[in-house]
Amino acid sequence: MAIDKITTPAVTDDSVTLAKMAPGTDGNIISYDASGNPVAVATGTAGHVLTSAGAGAPPTFAAAGGITEVDRWLMVDQSLSSGATMTNWSRHNTSYTGVPHGTGMSGSSGVWTFPSTGVYEITIMTYLNNGTTTRLYVGIGIKGTNDAFSSNTTSLGLSYGNVTTANDHDNLVVNAIYDVTNTSNNKLKFVVNSDGACGFYTTIATFKKLMET
């Protein structure tokens, strides 16, 4: 008589070898679903890590955490007065910078759009050059919004430099953290805040996504 059923007590511990298991897909791993039944977790892409889906669901392979978006833009040689939005940017994508890493930022008339939601670090650095004899206090404000600048604007960061005499210069750095929860509404721009027109030379803006929101 052929044996077509083996009861659990008949299977001794450590007796089922790999050779006796049903074939599967290369790279899959075995887990359990919400009902406690065994399931195969699909193979992830190279470089992905196994990520918990919480209680009651099998894990999945997903991209590893860390920096997923880095972008760097350059604005050169402009004389700007207070209230001006910094425009005329070009991506600083030489063969050494490796940007954009990820999708990258996009800008229009000085208003920046983020490629995805998440917590971003924004840094802008500039070299100020005063062409007059007037003492100037020159600042850059990093401005954000939650309605695409329809009516709401908030200050994310502000810093001032000081140029005293003709052809005096100073370096200025502003840094901010922005939690982007909606890429259609959360926008950003850089705005000049000064008591006179001043030259901005070799201005660099860097955008870095630190984590998911």
Image (cartoon, rainbow, N blue to C red):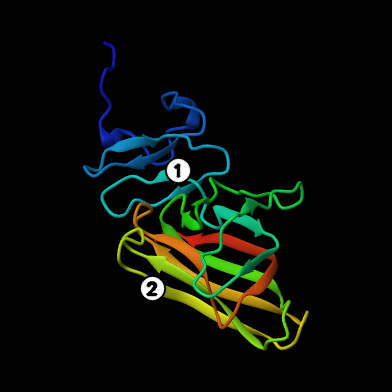
Q: Position of residue 134 (x, y in %)?
A: 68, 87
Query: What residue is shown at x 47% (from left), y 57% (from top)?
Result: 111
Residue 154: give its label. 2
Residue at the (41%, 67%) spot, across then down: 144
Instruction: Kindly identify the residue that appears in the image at 44 percent across and 26 percent down.
Output: 24
Question: What's the CA distance linking mark 2 and mark 1?
Answer: 38 Å
* Residue on which the image places disc 1: 61
Q: Which amino acid does label 2 sit on?
A: Thr
Secondary structure category for the residue under label 1? strand
Q: Where does the N terminus fall, quadrant-wise?
A: top left
Quarter of the figure that contains the C terminus: bottom left
Dot 2: element: strand
Tally the marks: 2
Q: Pick whichever of labels 2 and 1 is earlier in the sequence.
A: 1
**Circle 2 crowding by C-alpha within 10 Å: few under 14, some 14–19, many from 20:** few
Give coordinates of residue 22: x percent, y percent: 41, 24
